[in-house]
Amino acid sequence: MQKGKEAKPHIGIYGRRNTGKSSLINRFAGQEIAIVSDVAGTTTDPVKKSFEITDFGPVILIDTAGADDSGELGEKRIKKTIGTINTIDLAILVITNNLFDDFELELVKEFKSKDVPYFIIHNKSDIEPLSNKIRSDLEQKINCNILEFSNVTNKNIDEIVDLIKKTIPESSYKTPSLVGDLISYGDIVLLITPIDIEAPAGRMILPQVQAIRDILDNDAIAIVLKEREVDAFLRKTQVKPALAITDSQIFLKADASIPKDIPLTSFSIVLARLKGDFENYIKGTLKISELNDGDRILLLESCSHHVSCDDIGRVKIPRWLTNFTGKDLEYDVVAGLDNLPRPITDYSLVIQCGGCVITRKQLLNRIKPATLANIPINNYGMAIAYVQGIYKRAIAPFVKIEKSSIDYL
């Protein structure tokens, strides 16, 4: 399945100021894509660069500020650098002069806490090679691969690229099929895609495009139509789709139009199973019925977009939740990967979008603070299906396949 730019594997480059992080990125790319200077602290904010690794594929390289930055601004830069660890699939820690101390140990601690694989590059080895003692100490302390490198001689660049290929998790670039386990060769899949005020002009939204591609990759047939055409299509053609996928916002209309013997779900729920914590989403969705007056709900949108007057996250879901529960609820909506406006423990429920524009790693790290704090989490599509009374039908195809032990009925 083809990915958007942000869904490519992300590789973060970390280390102290003036260790040659930006130069390393330029060596990878074979061109000057990162600003290089002898002045420590030239890179002030994380900078993303697209890069194609031969015999592997496209990745996003993230050049970060020095972990030893100083002053009030330096502390803010370090905070941004640490924040990028939530978004990456692989970390490369760059050191020089055989120096590995508290700054590096803190970065390693962050990598491990986020389950991010990493390796170390000892840069500027033409000036001072890596000592056997430091190598031995590091192998005992942190047990990871260590390579020598020099931006001057370009020695070992191929070994670094090979190590990237070996270390980065397959899950970051080999995406499972969206619906491949639900359909067979020649099956017809009905995609119900409303063209409303939130639909982008002249094109379809990413989850719809991803679904079409995935259906074709599985040698099945995708039929795309608007919600008001479903009844006429089924009546005139007598076609019985193997699966119907709808935009979550028109679940009720789709539920009424699609015969009960045809599996029905939504684009958001399909993505929830692919990228999210599906088991905990199921548990968390049931908690909607336990909300009380004054509870605060956090809605997480992975993308940033122009907000319409009937926005799904800011308007529709809050309205549906309030009407369903009959409670006086508070809502916060956070777009992209921005910081939360308050501590995660202030929330009674977290609702995450499908996450079509980000990686699975980024999405899981986004919701991880909630799961660690035992705060219920769920998904846009699952929440909508639940409050509209069609939750069982919407998740039935996936629960049946995965043989979930959860009694969602």
Image: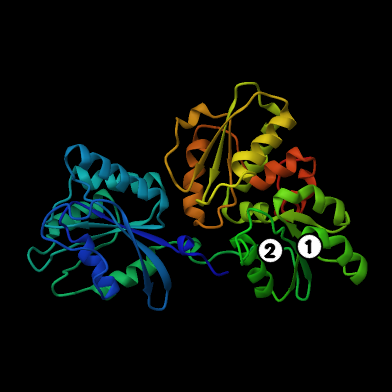
Seen in the picture, residue 313 relative to 296 is either above or below; the reply is: below
Q: Estimate the x, y position of residue 221 in percent, counting from the top left.
A: 75, 73
Which quadrant of the figure contains the C terminus? top right
Q: CA distance from mark 2 to mark 1?
A: 9 Å
From the viewer's side, name the closer residue of 329 and 365.
329
Left or right? Give the position of 409 relative to 44.
right
Disc 2 crowd rating (10 Å Cα; few below 14, some 14-19, many 20+) is some
Give the labeled residue for mark 1: 243
Classify mark 2: helix, strand or loop.
Answer: loop
Quadrant hosting residue 72: top left
Q: Residue at x 45, y 37 (%)?
A: 340
Give the labeled residue for mark 2: 179
Tell me whether the residue at label 2 lies in contact with that at label 1, contact meaning CB atoms closer than 8 angstroms. Answer: yes
Q: Estimate the x, y position of residue 188 in percent, counting from the top left.
A: 79, 70
Which amino acid type corresponds to the residue marked 1 in the rendered image?
A: Leu
The residue furthest bottom is 55
From the viewer's side, name the closer residue of 46 and 53.
46
Q: Estimate the x, y position of residue 59 in percent, counting from the top left.
A: 40, 67
